[in-house]
Image (cartoon, grey):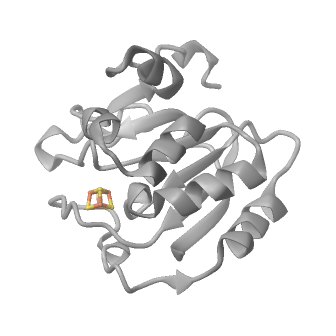
Amino acid sequence: MRIAGFNPESIVDGPGVRPVLYVQGCTHACKSCHNPSSWALDGGQEMTVEEVADLVASALRPLHRGVTFSGGEPFLQAADLARVADAIKLPVMVYTGFVIEELLASRDAGVRALLERAEILVDGRFVAEQKDLALIWRGSHNQRLIDVPASLRAGKAVEWTSLDAAG
Ligand code: SF4
C-alpha cells in the first residue's frame, strides 16, 4: 500500500472521534484540492496491509466510534483497504472522488469489497465553486453523505440521514 499520512484522532472526519488514514495516490485532479501532495501514485510511504492495520489499531481508544479512510483516493487501493477494515473491525467512513453510482457499477472485486465494509461515503470530487466551510464533513455542495449498506441493498444512491447521531 502507499500511505500519505495518519491522524490518530480527528473530530471533523466522521461521526464522533476517530483515527484518519490518508492514502497516497489520486487521479481526480480537483481544482484547489486540499492535499495535492497526495496525488502522486508513487509517492507517500510504502507499507504492507498488516503494517497499516497495526498503525490504525495502535491508535484506537474506547471512545473511537470508527475509522476514516481519506486521501488521496481510497478506491485506488480498495482491496487492501478492505483487508485493513477487516482487521480493525470498526465502522468505516470513506472519502472518495468517485460518485457511488460509479462505484456500484464497477466490476472490480476490491471496490465491491471496500463498499461492503463501509458505513458512510463522502462521494464526489471537490468543486471549488461549490465550496462551503459550513458543510458537515464535506468540502463542497456536490459531495454527498451516502449510507453505503442501504445503497448496496437498493442498488442506487441512498443518502445518509443520521446527522442527529453525528456527535
Ligand atoms: S479527490 Fe480529494 S485528494 Fe483527489 S484531487 Fe480531489 S480533493 Fe484532491
Q: In this view, does 153 lie above or below 72?
A: above
Label tally: 0
Q: Is residue 139 above or below residue 144?
A: below
Q: Residue at x 35, y 67 (%)?
A: 35
Q: In x, y percent, where is residue 10?
A: 63, 50
Q: In x, y percent, where is residue 80?
A: 56, 63
Q: Which residue is drawn at 54% across and 84% down?
A: 45
Q: In x, y percent, where is residue 13?
A: 53, 44
The reply, left or right, for residue 31 in relation to residue 104 is: left
Using the rendered image of the protein, determine whether residue 116 is visible from the camera's viewpoint: yes
Q: Residue at x 67, y 37 (%)?
A: 91
Residue toward you, 114 or 144: 114
Q: In x, y percent, where is residue 167?
A: 65, 25
Residue toward you, 94 or 135: 94
Name the image quarter holding residue 33.
bottom left
Using the rendered image of the protein, determine whether residue 9 is visible from the camera's viewpoint: no
Residue toward you, 149 or 144: 149
Q: In this view, does 13 lie above or below 134?
A: below
| The image quadrant in which ligand 1 is located | bottom left
Name the image quarter holding residue 100.
top left
* Extreme residue toward the left, this view: 129
Q: In this view, does 88 lie above or below 58?
A: above
**Image quadrant in which the N terminus is located:** bottom right
The reply, left or right, for residue 37 in relation to residue 19 is: left
